[in-house]
């Protein structure tokens, strides 16, 4: 199957700083990628759909100025959590589809202290 | 609005048993259904993808079925092993090309 690589797997940052998470499709091109957030013991919550060469589409309740998404190439999408606060601590996962099948990155555990 | 439900929420069985995880969805207009595995603190691994025109898919000890008309899918795990312990998630790709998720079944296989 296709491979989606996400980096970093873990990051700890100070409150008020920004953190960038990368999501790469390694062996296929993805015009669309998806960013999810997962709270403990809960299922995935779609945050936004990242579109190559255009603006991301954010789900209701997700602050686009807080979670900046850039999809500059067919194999890379980035999520930047700006001015991070402890409540942004969570598990973030990216996904891309190939032939209508969804593949996921390894996830990023963000801890804001 | 498509809704996906997984039953049970948690399951604990002795090693070696065969088991079935259930997934139901409310709208039969789907493109496909996927079963995933998630280990604690990890991303998701795709286990099986069933297209809307298919009835089942098999991979090793895993067999997934799909009954679109009744809105049901099952994931059958044969001869369970402690390494099968994980959370299993199902998701349907709906008519809007959105992935709709179940809440998952947490599976524990006791040695």
Image: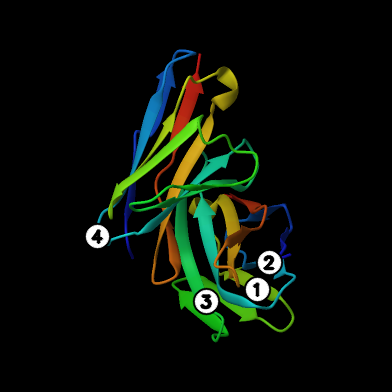
Q: Say yes or no: labels 1 and 2 on the same chain.
A: yes
Residue B64 position, x and y percent, is 56, 74
| Tag nearer the camera, 1 or 4 | 4
Q: Distance between the residues labelled 3 and 1?
A: 9 Å
Comes first in the chain, label 3 or label 1: 3
Q: Element type at marker 3?
A: strand
Q: Distance between the residues labelled 1 and 4?
A: 30 Å
Toward which corner of the image does residue A61 lie, by quadrant?
top right
* Nearest the eye: A76 or A94: A76
Of residue A48 and residue A25, the one placed in the foreground of this image is: A48
- Indicate which disc residue A27 carries: 4
Rendered location of residue A43, percent (x, y): 63, 47
For label 2, count other residues whose C-alpha is less than 10 Å away and answer few (under 14), some (14-19) or many (20+): many
Write down the chain letter for disc 3.
B
Asked whether residue B23 is in view, the answer is: yes
Q: Residue B50 carries which label?
A: 3
At a point 62% along the width and 68% down the height, the residue shown is B18
Q: Answer yes or no: do the residues labelled 3 and 1 have beta carbons within 8 Å?
A: yes
First of labels 2, 3 by sequence position: 2
User: How far, Cα to Cα, is label 4 from label 2?
Assistant: 31 Å
Chain under numbered label 1: B
Residue B73 marker? 1
Position of residue B17 relative to residue A20, above or below, is below
Question: Which secondary structure lies at badge 4?
Answer: loop
Same chain check for tags 4 and 2: no
- Relative placement, left or right, of A26 versus A8 is left
Q: Are marks 1 and 2 in contact (CB under 8 Å)?
A: yes
Give the number of the disc on residue B23: 2
Q: How far apart are marks 3 and 4 (CA)?
A: 22 Å
**C-beta proximity under 8 Å, tags 2 and 3:** no
Question: Which tag, 1 or 2, sits closer to the chain's start?
Answer: 2
The residue under the point 72% across, 69% down is B24
């Amino acid at each position: 199957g296709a491979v989606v690589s996400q980096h970093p797997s873990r990051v700890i940052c100070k409150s008020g700083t920004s953190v960038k998470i990368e999501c790469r499709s390694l062996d296929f091109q993805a015009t669309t990628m998806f960013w999810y957030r997962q709270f403990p013991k809960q299922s995935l919550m779609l945050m936004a759909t990242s579109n190559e060469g255009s603006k991301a589409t954010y789900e209701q309740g997700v602050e686009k100025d807080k979670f900046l998404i850039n999809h500059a190439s067919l194999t890379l999408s980035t999520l930047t959590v700006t001015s991070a606060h402890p409540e942004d601590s969570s598990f973030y996962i990216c996904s891309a589809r190939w032939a209508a099948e969804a593949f996921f990155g390894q996830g990023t555990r963000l801890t804001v202290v | 609005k498509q809704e996906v439900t997984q039953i049970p929420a948690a399951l604990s069985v002795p090693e070696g048993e065969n088991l079935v995880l259930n997934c139901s969805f409310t709208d039969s207009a789907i493109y496909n259904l996927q079963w995933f595995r998630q280990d604690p603190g990890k991303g998701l691994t795709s286990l099986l993808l069933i297209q809307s025109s298919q009835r089942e898919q098999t991979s090793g000890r895993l067999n997934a079925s799909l009954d679109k008309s009744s809105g049901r899918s099952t994931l059958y795990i044969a001869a369970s092993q402690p390494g099968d312990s994980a959370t299993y998630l199902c998701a349907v790709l709906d008519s809007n090309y959105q992935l709709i998720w179940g809440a998952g079944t947490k599976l524990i296989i006791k040695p």
